[in-house]
Image (cartoon, rainbow, N blue to C red):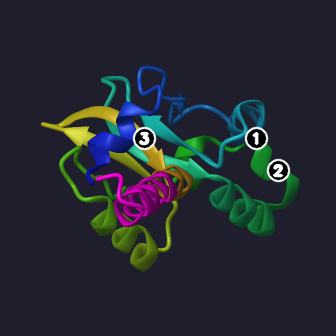
Amino acid sequence: MHVSGILKHKDSSSIISAKPGDTIETVAALLAAHRIGAVLVLDPGGGVAGIISERDIVRGLATHGPAVLNQSVSELMTRKVVACAPGDSVSSIMTRMTEGRFRHMPVMDGGRLVGFISIGDVVKHRLAEATSEVESMRVYVAGGF
């Protein structure tokens, strides 16, 4: 299966994002309000400038203490963002996330942002896929083919 299959079950029309000049306090509130672990940081043209995650905020808090809340997103965000395409296989995305030790990935199509997936989305998709395969095998074995 491909990333496009994951996107079909997600509302990709409303990608939660931040701007490089937003404060960490603003982003922390955004993460909490939407119960998510990361947001894309978009430049004024809508391009991906980076990603800011709970992990980035915790590292900033450990380094700068409570003053980190007043820092800008651009000071803490991860600038090197690994993206995928709708045609990439789900297994290749799982491998890239595991090897890179990150849990969120923008989906780009022809240089345009079309979605944002998390490891949770990938796992949910794989579980649904496995459940469907088991059910198909059960029907086949039972003679319902």
Instruction: Give the CA separation, mark 3 to mark 2.
Output: 29 Å
Q: Nearer the viewer, residue 133 or 43?
A: 133
Cα separation, mark 1 vs mark 3, equals: 26 Å
For marks 1 and 3, the one nearer the N-term is 1
Magenta span: 126-145
Mark 2, Cα crowd under 10 Å, few <14 / some 14-19 / many 20+, is few
Q: Which residue is rendered at x = 54% and y = 29% of the image? A: 16
Instruction: Give the main secondary structure, helix, strand or loop, of the magenta stretch.
Output: helix
Q: Which residue is mark 2?
A: 67
Task: Pick whichever, 44 or 102, lies toward us.
Answer: 102
Classed neighbour count for the residue bearing mark 3: other residues with Cα under 10 Å, few (<14), some (14–19), many (≥20): many
Q: Is residue 4 magenta?
A: no
Position of residue 132 measured from the top left corner of the image (x, y, whole percent): 43, 53
Q: Is residue 130 magenta?
A: yes
- The correct choice, above or below, for 31 with respect to 139 in the image is above
Q: How many marks?
A: 3
At horizontal 46% and vertical 56% (from top left) the residue drawn is 135
Q: What residue is shown with label 1?
A: 70
Circle 3 residue = 116
| Residue 31 picture quarter | top right
Tell me the SS state at disc 1: helix
User: Is residue 115 toward the left or the right of residue 32 in the image?
Assistant: left
User: Would you say the residues marked 2 and 1 are in contact, meaning their CB atoms lie under 8 Å apart?
Assistant: yes
